[in-house]
Amino acid sequence: MNDQPKVREGFVIDDRQNEEQIKKAVENHPAPEIASSPADIDAAQADDVVWPIVVRLTFKPIKNNKGEVVNELSFREPRGGDINRYGNPVRMNNQGEWIIEERKMHYIMAALSDILPPFLDAMDPRDWNVCAYELMRFFLPTRRVS
């Protein structure tokens, strides 16, 4: 005959041997580490930024306000006043995707780099996009809880 009591679904047998097996299993298999979400990573990276941000123009240099040829743009940290004057250059569409509003981003880039918009008009589109995507993350909301 079998000495062990019958186990029915939903009931737990209270015995020391079962507890020791569970304890050993937990010790041998630590809980998995949960990876950070992309939003958490972006928020952490935004805090680690050293201003000004310098973006190298790899495809075509442009002229600055003094007529000098520049191979890189230096952007100061954006402030609320910049959004008030030029608008928020990033918005969310109906599908939940973040979209850069080009005209607003162009004027924000001009304000942050202290180069007039007509000089930025001469930028290679690939350089312009590198600058825009580099700045984009600073105009996205974060879910920080104080």
Image (cartoon, rainbow, N blue to C red):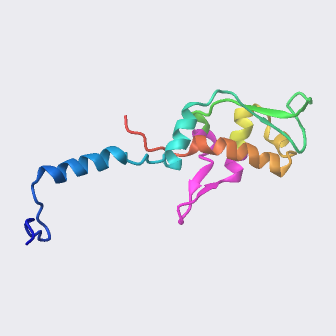
Residue 34 seen in the current view: yes
* Above or below, 48 relative to 134: above
Rendered image quadrant of residue 77: top right
Q: Image point 87% across, 34% down: which residue?
A: 71
Q: Nearer the viewer, residue 33 or 118?
A: 33
Give percent across and percent down for residue 26.
30, 47
Q: Image point 43% across, 44% down: which residue?
A: 143
Give percent across and percent down for residue 47.
54, 32
* Above or below, 60 relative to 5: above
Q: Nearer the viewer, residue 18 or 138?
A: 18
For the C terminus, which image quadrant?
top left
Residue 30 falls left or right of residue 16? right
Q: Image point 18% across, 54% down: which residue?
A: 18
**Can residue 61 be found in the magenta stretch?**
no
Q: Nearer the viewer, residue 78 or 134?
A: 134
* Above or below, 43 relative to 5: above
Residue 85 falls left or right of residue 111? left
* Above or below, 125 relative to 1: above
Give percent across and percent down for residue 54.
75, 32
Residue 17 falls left or right of residue 133? left
Q: How many marks are shown on the rendered structure?
A: 0
Q: Image point 84% across, 46% down: which residue?
A: 121
Residue 80 seen in the current view: no
Give percent across and percent down for residue 42.
55, 42
For the N terminus, which image quadrant?
bottom left
Residue 56 falls left or right of residue 63? left
Rendered image quadrant of residue 52: top right
Magenta residue span: 83-106
